[in-house]
Image (cartoon, rainbow, N blue to C red):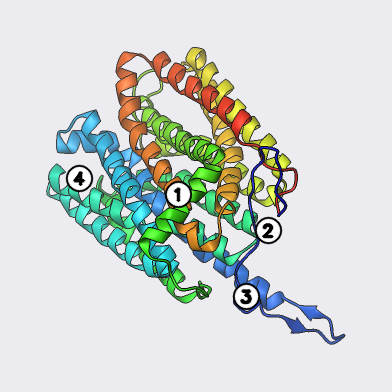
Amino acid sequence: MEKTKQRKLNIAFESEIPSSNSNKTTKKDKNGESSDKGGSKGQIWTFIAIATIPLVLVLGNSMLVPILPDMQEKLGISRFQSSLVISLFSVTAGLIIPISGYLSDRFSRKSVIIPSLIVYGAAGVLAGFGAIWNSYTILIIARAIQGIGAAGTAPIAMALVGDLYNGATESKALGLTEASNGTGKVVSPIFGSLLALIAWYAPFFAFPVFCTLSLLAVIFIIKEPQKNKKPQNLKAYMKQIGSILKEKGRWLITSFFAGSLALFILFGVLFYLSDILEEAPYNIDGVMKGLVLAIPLLGMVATSYTTGALIKKNGTLMRWLMNIGLMLMTVSLALTIFLFNNIYIFIGLLTLSGIGTGLLLPCLNTMITGSVQKAQRGMITSIYNSLRFIGVAFGPPIFEWLMKISHQTVFITVSSLALITLGLVFFLVKPQGKIS
């Protein structure tokens, strides 16, 4: 790529995977022309296997959102303590993710993902027994252990996508990964509410089942490309990461912040809705509450998948979509300051905000994953995902604190943050017209 004096992003999408590891098998038809139908089938199954990883991850948080009020009642804990069940999981994951990223760069993606899924599922069982024993201490410790397992799942899967695919296929796969993440957010409130009909702690025991299915898919379906280079020592590796951040930090750090804010708002709003929907004038509980929680998330999922399929290598389109997405978030969240009393308008505005998030995240994922070579990809995507987890962690407790002041304060704060992020992205994140 030629150097330019203009301040535009320098993102490389070329794959380092030899053609033999591309998950495609070329066959000749009877006319002697090549066909890759077998490869297409294999690619679909690989897509599905990768998609299970963020799906399992998000179930670990979102499926618990509907049962937080029940948890407060059964365990005799405060609303802040129940928010820590979400937040501590995310804080632990956020702290461990960079370590997982380094290990995945040094060894392999699967060597990190597989044990992480095992830890994640086993800690889910421990959390379930903590709930049965009415022990908030055991429950919160188990959630912290789950966070350690979560650190080696979806963040490493994002780097794996960058290893397996390039160009338009990479964008599509990343869009599918984000859509899978969002799909988990859509179905998990409903699924969590249904499981709670059996017992309020039943969602904890569902994690191991999903983890096992994802684990089998990763082991038997995903064929990871072999590393062609000897791993760098830690000092050289960190020096190279520092050079990348120094060279591209202006737009990378802005992108990290934008992704973190989007998840902060998303999980904060879910926590907020889960609490207020049971109160007057809404009086919505049980499975119906799960369905209402899923509506804004459904808007995000559909938009994420469509965005990932459309953006390909078009940097100009990415810039438009990111700014439009943040603008939608800003305007819709600002309008909820005045219109939160009408449930239909309220959920409609939150759905518009979810659509804005769906426009933003796939673009960020594609740019960040394509910004570095394979040898450093795990660490860069891990830093990004670490900050996303920190956003998730701070969402519920900060929203809980803002709710004590007033409902208007909640949305004044988040719409202002969205507006600030819009300004940062508009001025600092400027992809080239055609990313190569």
Q: Which mark is residue 185?
A: none
Q: Can you identify the residue that label 4 sits on? A: 140
Q: Which mark is residue 242?
A: 1
Instruction: Identify which residue, 173 or 355, lies in the foreground.
Output: 173
- Of labels 3 and 4, earlier in sequence is 3
At label 1, the amino acid type is: Gly
- Of labels 3 and 1, earlier in sequence is 3
Q: Tell me where residue 215 appears, x and y as whole percent.
A: 39, 68
Task: Tell me: residue 207, above or below residue 194.
Answer: below
Res 214 visible:
no
Seen in the image, is 109 located left or right of residue 372? left
- Of labels 4 and 2, earlier in sequence is 4
Q: Which mark is residue 18?
A: 3
Query: Spatial distance from mark 3 to mark 4, Cα to Cα?
Result: 45 Å
At label 2, the amino acid type is: Gly
Res 283 visible:
yes
- Of labels 1 and 2, earlier in sequence is 2
Instruction: Identify which residue, 62 or 422, lies in the foreground.
Output: 422
**Which element type, helix, strand or loop, lies under badge 2?**
helix
